[in-house]
Image: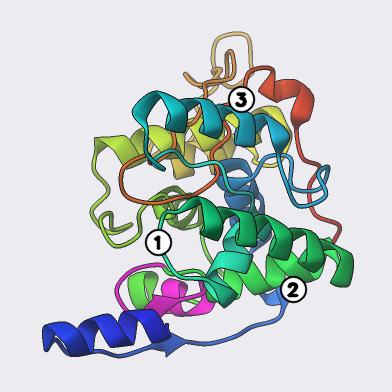
């Protein structure tokens, strides 16, 4: 928040902060689970670092001779948002890793996710789930619909570039992929899946059951934003074996 305000002052642009902290239980479970799928599918299994993603990031960075690929866990992103800047250097990455490990030892997974969802940027001057829900949809973080929750989760990849109100095809693809994965894991009902992807309510086929959604087949890797932001995707192979359990209510 301070960095964005300083940036606005340098540019002579108006600045403002819309930030409203709410407890974990007042953030939609649909949003919590969608964010985990989109940003850090192994969150409840790792100790702050996802070595599969770190390895993939390192290989891509070596190939391109620059720090471009995402790969940070939610804990790493929280460490960066709280304590570090946006520079892409090896030193900053090492600091991020150390801080993430310290955060994991100091507080619970639930608290880490609560802080993350309250502090991440969801557009210019918009921080946290409550502010985002009210800013974009005129509702509260605990009353988001399935589509609203998945749109918010999908634009985290670059919230200053993509808006949940005017999602481009790339964001719609992410919504469909996240929704399909959540449906297979029992985190979305059939009706919620249809709502999330903008399809009509499920119709009964001749056999009496709902038609199978288009995206309910094999897991589709979620892309990461390589050029504009440094977030953790879920593109590692064998994803279905690394599913994160739903947060304990």
49 left or right of 83? Answer: right
Mark 2 to mark 1: distance in Å?
Answer: 33 Å
Q: How is the image coloured?
A: rainbow
- Secondary element type, mark 1: loop
Q: Which residue is mark 3?
A: 236
Q: Going 71% across and 35% down the picture, which residue do you hit?
A: 51
Q: Going 59% across and 22% down the picture, which residue do you hit?
A: 210
- Secondary element type, mark 3: loop
- Secondary element type, mark 2: helix
Q: Which residue is mark 1?
A: 87
Q: Residues within 10 Å of mark 3 (few under 14, many from 20)?
A: some
What stretch of residues is rendered in magenta?
A: 122-134
The numbered mark, 2 or 3, whose residue comes first in the sequence reads 2
Question: Residue 35: x and y, percent?
Answer: 58, 52
Q: Which mark is residue 25?
A: 2
Q: Quadrant of the N terminus?
A: bottom left
């Amino acid at each position: 928040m301070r960095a964005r305000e300083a940036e606005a002052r340098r540019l002579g642009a108006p600045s403002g902060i819309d930030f409203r902290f709410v407890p974990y239980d007042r953030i939609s479970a649909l949003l919590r689970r969608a964010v985990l799928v989109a940003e850090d599918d192994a969150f409840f299994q790792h100790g702050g670092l996802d070595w599969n993603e770190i390895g993939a990031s390192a290989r891509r960075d070596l190939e391109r001779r620059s720090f471009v690929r995402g790969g940070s866990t939610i804990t790493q992103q929280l460490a960066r948002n709280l304590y570090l800047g946006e520079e892409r250097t090896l030193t900053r990455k090492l600091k991020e890793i150390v801080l993430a490990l310290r955060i994991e030892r100091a507080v619970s997974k639930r608290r880490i996710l609560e802080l993350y969802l309250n502090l991440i940027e969801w557009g210019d001057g918009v921080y946290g789930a409550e502010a985002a829900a009210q800013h974009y949809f005129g509702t509260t973080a605990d009353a988001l619909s399935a589509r609203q929750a998945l749109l918010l989760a999908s634009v985290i990849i670059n919230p200053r570039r993509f808006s949940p109100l005017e999602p481009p095809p790339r964001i719609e693809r992410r919504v469909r992929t996240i929704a399909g994965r959540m449906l297979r894991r029992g985190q979305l009902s059939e009706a919620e899946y249809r709502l999330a992807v903008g399809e009509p309510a499920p119709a009964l086929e001749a056999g009496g059951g709902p038609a199978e959604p288009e995206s309910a087949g094999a897991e589709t890797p979620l892309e990461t934003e390589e050029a504009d932001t440094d977030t953790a995707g879920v593109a590692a192979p064998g994803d279905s074996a690394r599913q994160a359990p739903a947060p304990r209510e």
